[in-house]
Image (cartoon, rainbow, N blue to C red):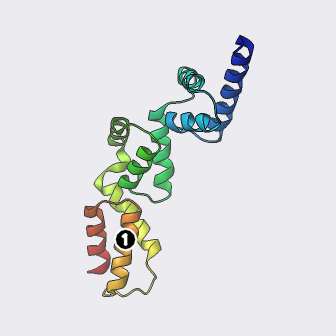
Amino acid sequence: MFNHELKTKKEKAWSKALSFITYRQRSKKETKDYLLQKKYAPDIVDEVIEKLKVYGFLNDEIFVQEWAEYSLKRGRGLQRIKQELWEKGIEKDIIETVLNNSEEFTFEKEYERASQVIKKYLPEDYSKSDRNLIRKSINHLKRRGFSHEIVYEIIKVYFD
């Protein structure tokens, strides 16, 4: 391959990557997968990823913080946020470090969020003895990513 052709492919890959990451913050894995899907050679992709990291355009720690903020606004619990981040290719130790250092993931804050979620979910005139509604409420909170302990406490308050 000619040097000029290689340079052009690198420039195109760089341009594609910049376009991809300007929409929202991306993880390294998301960006790498995107470029590979666009059929760029793995060595070119690796070079572009490194360049993006050097320039500070790709940072998985910042990605975790921003994804957590986004997810919290949507009423998601810690377990679901961790799962989504893992699926996006974030290393477990980065997820744990960033989220454990956040004040948003205390038991009290998780309980508050779960309480807000269940208030929106339950009809105003719900029956506290409706077994089907209890089951559906438990499943709703679990799908949102709240822990067993949080779900148990919420169900105890809203259905006892």
Which is nearer the eye, 16 or 65? 16
Which is nearer the eye, 80 or 127? 80
Whether residue 8 sits left or right of residue 143 in the image: it is right
Q: Which residue is drawn at 45% across and 60% down?
A: 75
Which is nearer the eye, 81 or 73? 81
Q: How crowded is mark 1: few (under 14 residues within 10 Å), some or many (20 or more)?
A: some
Above or below 26: residue 124: below
Numbered disc 1: secondary structure = helix
Q: Which amino acid does label 1 sit on?
A: Asn
Above or below 45: residue 64: below
Name the image quarter holding the N terminus: top right
Q: In the rendering, at what x and y percent does residue 8 appear?
A: 73, 20
- Identify residue for label 1: 139
Whether residue 72 sits left or right of residue 148 in the image: it is right
Q: Residue at x 35, y 57 (%)?
A: 110
Q: In the rendering, at what x and y percent does residue 157 appear?
A: 28, 74
State the residue lying farthest toward the top. Answer: 3
Name the image quarter holding the C terminus: bottom left
Which is nearer the eye, 40 or 135? 40
Q: Which residue is drawn at 38% across and 77% down?
A: 136
Q: Which residue is drawn at 31% across and 70% down?
A: 154
Q: In the rendering, at what x and y percent does residue 70 appear?
A: 51, 50
Write down the quadrant of residue 156 in the picture.
bottom left
Question: Exactly how many numbered labels are in the figure?
Answer: 1
Above or below 156: residue 62: above
Q: In the rendering, at what x and y percent does residue 69 appear?
A: 48, 47
